[in-house]
Amino acid sequence: MFLFIFRFFLLSFVFSLYSQELKSQNFEKAKCLNHQDLAISKLLDFDELKSLMEKSFTSIEKIKKFSVIDGFYKDFFYLKNLNDNLSRKSLNMLKQWSEKTQIKTSKIDLAEDKKLTKESITSAIKEKLILEAQRARTFAYAPYSKFHVGAAILTKNGNIYSAANFENAAYGNTICAERSAIAKAVSSENRGVSLQQNADIIAIAIVIRGGGGSPCGNCRQALNEFNPNMLVIMSDVDGENVVEKNLYELLPMAFGPSNLDKSN
Ligand SMILES: [Zn+2]
């Protein structure tokens, strides 16, 4: 009986993946509220979940959305294995993922003349940044390492640029999610004025499975170019185990643009 109820819940959730009216589905909301510690049946395995999800989309939808679906059910499987009971937070996160299937530039709404600073980043903004990194992570192209990473950069204008890692058959061409996000931010906002001078990039969230999305050395150096003082938020895939550091703590005695000035 319980399995039936859970399957019903899961199917309704899957069907709502691409519905813009998810919030209006009171049934779905009630399910989440009433099952804050929803037990995941041991009988529902990964293949079954995959099959359920794949049956729910047309071929064209699968082709267009495959990376999102792929990341989604992998994360669901991971969370299911990690916890016999999915927390309310995890359930809400799955709902949010489903609402975030479209590729778009996200933004923190600010008053017209207001700018964000590192000090003014609220916990709600941090959560949003992590969520954007989680969403971006589902777009990762990592057929070799299977290691999916998402990153989201926040600028002082409130713009968020998210990206995932993408690999290459020539392994050395692989680009990390952090540098992928930098490329997106710079190519969108740099207008002949150095982003570094204006400290436009004020924070980055990085999400990996297994906790501690700590950026590699290459990415620390690449981020340092734009603001050694930026906030680095490192999170597990389910938004837990969040660690915050200043970039200068992760890359002490960094070599940056100012060193080139001193050499003249
Ligand atoms: Zn890296």
Image: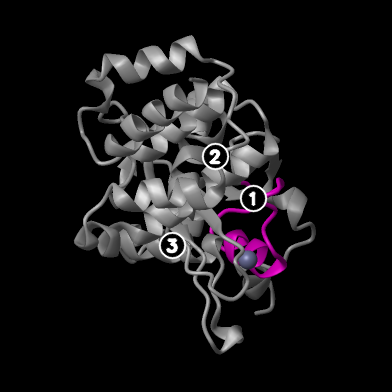
Residue on which disc 1 sits: 209
Amino acid identity at mark 3? Ser
Q: Is residue 218 above or below residue 125?
A: below
- SS at circle 1: loop
Q: Which of marks 2 and 1 is in front?
A: 2
Query: Is residue 210 one of those drawn in magenta?
Result: yes
Q: In this view, does 196 lie above or below 86?
A: below
- Marks 2 & 1, CB-CB < 8 Å contact: no
Local packing at callout 1 (Cα closer than 10 Å; few below 14, some 14-19, many 20+) is many
Amino acid identity at mark 1? Arg
- x then y, percent, for residue 119: 57, 29
- x then y, percent, for residue 102: 28, 48
Distance between the Cα atoms at labels 2 and 1? 22 Å
Upstream in sequence: badge 2 or badge 3 = 2
Distance between the Cα atoms at labels 2 and 3? 52 Å
Residue farthest toward the right in the current orientation of the protein: 253
Quadrant of picture, ligand 1: bottom right
Residue on which disc 3 sits: 194
- x then y, percent, for residue 10: 40, 32
What span is colored magenta in the figure? 209-229
**Can residue 231 be spotted in the picture?**
no
Upstream in sequence: badge 1 or badge 3 = 3
Residue at coordinates 70% horizontally, 45% vertically from top-left? 211
Residue at coordinates 43% horizontally, 62% vertically from top-left? 194
Local packing at callout 2 (Cα closer than 10 Å; few below 14, some 14-19, many 20+) is few
Residue at coordinates 53% horizontally, 73% vertically from top-left? 143
- Marks 2 & 3, CB-CB < 8 Å contact: no
Amino acid identity at mark 2? Leu
Residue on which disc 2 sits: 44
